[in-house]
Image (cartoon, rainbow, N blue to C red):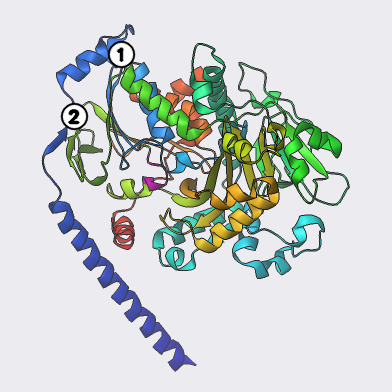
Amino acid sequence: MATILSKAGKALALGGAGLGTAAAYRYQNLKKEESLLPTNELWKFSDDNLRKSNDTTNSNKKNKKQLIVVGGGVVGVTAAYKAALKGHSVVLLEPRSEPGKECSACAAGGMQRSNPVVDMSTWVAVTKCIAPVSRYVLGGDGGGGGRDSEPYNFFHIDWWSTLTDPFFLRWVMTFTRTSFVPPPDQADKQREMLSFTNYAIRDMVTMMNDRRDPMAKKSGYNPNGSLSLSYDAPGPVPVAEEKATPTGTNSTTTATIATSAAAVPNHPSGRSTYEPSKQIKGDEITHNEPSILHQKQQPTVAKFEYESSAASSERFTEELADRCLRDPKLDVTFLYDTRVKAVNFHIGNSNKTKITQLRTNRGVVDVPDDAQVLVAAGSWTPHVMALMDLYAPVYPLKGYAMSISAKDVLAAKKDLRPRDLPTRIVSDKYMFTSRLGDEIRITSIGEFSGWSTSPTPKVDEEFRHEAIRQFPQLEPFIKEAKTKCGHRPYVSDGILLLGRIHSFENLLVSCGPGSNGWKLAMGSGEIAERLVAGQTEDDISKELGFDAHAFSPAGRVLHAPTLTRLYRARWNV
């Protein structure tokens, strides 16, 4: 036995040495590629930029800053918009040719005042999907009746692309540890994030409800509420009436906050919420949402969040980007088809790292002494941060989405009426359908498969099958609709990453926490602008009524030069 173990140890050592050598070789090739990047000046802040930013009605000119935003999704564009409103000069770098065309284009659009929480129930639900045999150990193997007897696998994993990625292994260890042994302040952070979510959505809804502002129409804003359906056998369902936080306050003591999985029976994990709701049954469900009558199996009970709303994240992002370009008072420059490939930095006067240049596929963007860099790249944030030897605990959770035009459906199927189509958010187990103006958006699935945005054929087939089950009247359109995939930036502890990187003089991050980052965009943009303007987390907390320290990247975004080089070698970035 000792001989066998000794040989096995030697084999592992040799294998590890081989992998290390291969990683080092690939990393050296990456550095060679960096040396070949174009050296032309792509963008440089000029005196005209700063003068333009100071020619505003805002009298506090000393706070006018220069900001470089990396990432053109809803979070990056909203941050740029918020900064420009305060007179800052902004340049935004986006790898795609248009804003909001990845995760922002696939978001369901829900704007509920609630947050998923990372806890043991999250881990169990995910494990039962990616390892079905675990249902016999963890429960849920089909004995509950209803649709649970044939569980829909809402979660998938590409074992090769994940288990061969040391970054994923580190991420999943943190996710598991947080699920089973949460840090002492985890519950406090979740409460602060819920208060922040309430603040952020209130800001967004204010814009939508402004009759002078066309954003509601542009983004397909829908304030008709949300129905969460259950097909379980009749019986008591733990859906309680909740009181929403009164307008104008962020105090968690004024709301009933549900944080257990039982509080929301149709979701795979626990959720904390401020949304008022009521339980409805039988005919009352179909009276509120007649489109459900087409389902073969009718729901027995539903949770109706009657004040929640939804909008298109993609169209919201496009409209804000257009405003930045149309309004001469907003100094925002968009550099599309521009991917950050390398970062130059050095130790500054304060013994902190200072970014001096962003090197892209199109040329160099200089970072002046008084400029700051905000990384708001969604699930690509770890790639960008790794260029600065930083580990960011964010992994892409690939979501599937499709869109169907209500007008096209009614034109093609004369037997259908408007009431036969969904009129609000309708969530059914792990499906999430929202009505966004003419658009019917159907979303579902979580998939760990690296940074690929291509649909996995088998997963796509399951997605379409379940969508047809939910809305059989849309079957021909569901079969023909194009599936789009986007990466949800899943932070390992489920808490938003937002704040300064304190080991750097001029670096901030805004990312996550997962499936609901879009509805936080107005709030995260506000905090980012305040930090850029020189406010501290203490200042922000005092003025806005929640603890901004709860989202700080301190202790979560880590300096890890050796590991980030290994990750880059694995990702080839």
Which amino acid does the dot numbered 2 rest on? Answer: Pro
Residue to which mark 2 is pinned: 368
- SS for tag 2? loop
Relative to 48, say whether 99 is above or below.
Answer: below
Count neighbours of disc 2 (C-alpha within 10 A) and say few if under 14, some if 14 to 19, many if 20 or more.
some
Which residues are drawn in magenta? 377-381
Count neighbours of disc 1 (C-alpha within 10 A) and say few if under 14, some if 14 to 19, many if 20 or more.
some
Tell me the mark number nearer the camera, choosing from 1 and 2: 1
* Tag of residue 329: 1
The residue furthest left is: 40
Relative to 212, say whether 190 is above or below.
Answer: below
Q: Give the image quarter of residue 132.
A: bottom right
Left or right: 397 in relation to 318: right
Q: Give the image quarter of residue 3.
A: bottom left
Residue 365 among magenta residues? no
Residue located 63% across and 59% down the image: 153
Residue located 50% across and 50% down the image: 483
Left or right: 239 in relation to 385: right
Which amino acid does the dot numbered 1 rest on? Answer: Lys
Left or right: 510 in relation to 413: left
From the image, give the main secondary structure of the stretch colored magenta: helix
**In the rendered view of the protein, which quadrant contains the C terminus?**
bottom left
Residue 154 visible, this orientation: no
x then y, percent, for residue 241: 79, 31
Q: Assess whether mark 2 and mark 1 are in contact (beta carbons under 8 angstroms).
A: no
Which of the two discs, 1 and 2, labels the residue nearer the N terminus? 1
Front-most of 203 and 152?
152
Query: Total marks drawn?
Result: 2
* Tag of residue 465: none
x then y, percent, for residue 535: 38, 21
- The answer for how far apart the CA atoms under marks 1 and 2 are is 22 Å
Front-most of 350 and 101?
101
